[in-house]
Amino acid sequence: MNGGVVRRWPILAVVALAFVLRAMGAFDVALPYSFYGDEINNVERSVNFYDGRGGFDLNPHWFNKPALGYYLNFFTFGCRYLVGRHLLGEYQSPADFGDDFLNYERGPIYVIARLLQAFYGSLGVLLTWRIGRRLGGERIGILAAVFLCICPAHVTFSQVVKNDALASVFLCLSFLAILDVVERGRLRDHLLASAWIGLGFATKYTPLAMMAVLGLAHMLRPRPEGSRAIAPGTTALGLGVCVLAAFVGSPYNFLDPTWASTNLSQVLSHVGRMVFGAGEVDPNKYGIPYLIWYGLRITLAESCFSWPLGLLAMAGLTIGARGRGRNRVLMLAAWLGVFYFLFAVASSQRIRPNHLMLVYPALAIAAAWGTERIAGRLAARWHLRPDRLLAGIVLLVILPWPGSPGSGLVHRMLELRGKPAALRAMEWVWANVPAGTTIVNDHEVLILKPTVERYRWILHRIDLGVERARRGIATEREKAAQAADYDREESERILRHHEAMLEEWLDQRKRFDFEARAARRYGRPRYDVFVVEKPWQTEDGDTLAPYFGYNPLWEVFPLPLLDRRNIHLAELDRLPPVERYRRTPETLKGLQPGNRLLHPLLDGRPVDYWIASEETFDNYDKPKKRREFPMWAEFFDDLRRHYDAVEIPAGSSNERWSIRIFDLRQRRENGATVRRLDRGP
């Protein structure tokens, strides 16, 4: 046993280093806050499976992502609660735990969840070693593990709470079983690969594409005479196992009709439309060669896989694969090809570094092939020892010179040590803006807690949504019952829409009611803050589809919109664009029936501050955006020209956006000023 450990010390050391690099992200200086929207969303959804007042509800009621990763997060959070209650005496009930979480005392939760991702990432390094060893021997396995260990994007997305690292683990496990299918052709290997793919689907949907690689392996499997051949129904049986595993991992994707009627239909619509052109990947706008080049450019970026490793991987797939088993090379190339096509072309989004988490292991193995072959050829030409030359190439790749993965890692570590601009902006607001001030939190760039009045407004808006959805359901059922020639298919579609909206509103009602109660213990200033969302993210229209997480509580320009009913007020058109948001004319009072709070400005009080990131306030300088969204362009032109601002610059080279806090209390006709807080507040 000790001899085995000694022989395995290189891979144990690599995996340990991988975990340390990834675990460092758990302790960034922003704690107890996170300013990464996906991480906030994923942690909140993982916690929401238990309501301190309503009990367990394992239905996520949100299917943009499957639930397996959230369930595993929830299990670890439950362990944290049990330790806090029974060993540390921090909580008397689950409601206490929920109150702390909703008041942003989330430091321990973020640390636990991030360490879990670090574990997934380091497990992926171990599995990459196993795959590399199967494909090319121990040396290739170690090299592949080293390259994945230092891959900047793999490190980054194993440090934040997303589903990518876990999905990559399931993909590696499925590929190991696929190699068994190619080499042995056994039914159990086929079913095991299908099960791992199903669990991958239960984590992130896109691992389902690995079924294409499994299908290729099925065609290439050995068929020796006299052996048990895989039955003709293997494909159907494998699909059944895949579906069963997906059901076990994320059951409400199958039990809740909302997923099929909303999210699944949206996904299928996007996949179908990409053939004809749509969204960010419209081949009619850019062309498929451009999209593939764009994906390659993203891959070779320093913060992603890096161009040195990328070039080694290209070499590995050409010269490095020669002399190896043809089927093994085909399997690795199929893994890369299927997912690059999926992410670069067959997607409604441009390719992102986190999407490539599913192919970084394959790229690392290809890079190991390339490194070994290049070192061997150079050693033969220069009469050097191959091992030393191989070590020199690896060392050269690791060193932090511009463009190298080492440089990407250094930048990532510096980013973790720097205080984010959003945190410095929040500290400035707490120190300089009185509690209760009305603030527009553009795109929810800061984490600010609303006042009691704003919570009341939010809950009232939700109640209006519930009322509207129930009225729509009743009306549609009445029409269907009374009209014999009514379009049943259209009626069912409308009914499903109202039912989905009702479920969403009720879920929001429970969430905000609980949050409003918990906010009584909040120790920071609370503001009359509301969020605006704008449609600039998409290129195919001025609406945000529910598939992309559109929240109907957010206000959407152009104003005035009252309760999203397009009530137009000529009086507002006569005001400068910012003043349309800033104050409510007397005419609005007559349009609010009873005590319904339809307009975002409470009691006519003006908006005093507008907080936005550079991503927003500079976005409409682009000619394309100015053409497509002229009202937003006019608004931000007016905002920047006539209102003073405090700018909190990005805190590190890897932090993309500065933040500006615009003071709307006084309009400057002779030009506004911007005061930069270079050293923080």
Image (tube, rainbow, N blue to C red):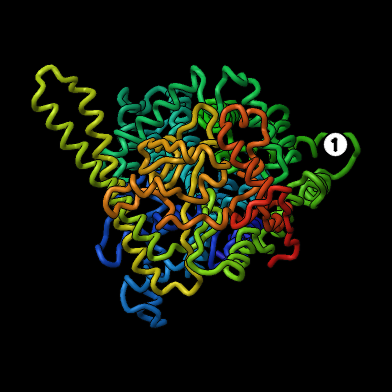
Q: Is residue 256 left or right of residue 433?
A: left
- Looking at the image, can residue 323 be seen? no
Q: Is residue 341 left or right of residue 643?
A: left
Say if residue 438 shows up in the picture.
Answer: yes
Give the residue at x 42% y 65%.
451
Identify residue for label 1: 378
Q: Position of residue 656 (x, y in %)?
A: 67, 49
**Which residue, as the protein is rendered here, is positioned at the far right?**
382
Q: Viewed as shown, does residue 170 lie left or right of 376?
A: left
Q: Quadrant of residue 475?
A: top left
Residue 252 image position (x, y, % from top left): 29, 45
Residue 195, picture quadrant: top left
* Rendered residue at 44%/42% (across/down): 204
Viewer-proximal residue, 25 or 666? 666
Percent position of residue 598, x then y: 35, 48
Q: Position of residue 116 (x, y in %)?
A: 49, 60
Which residue lies at the image location 41% right of the left edge and 40% below the top edge?
A: 561
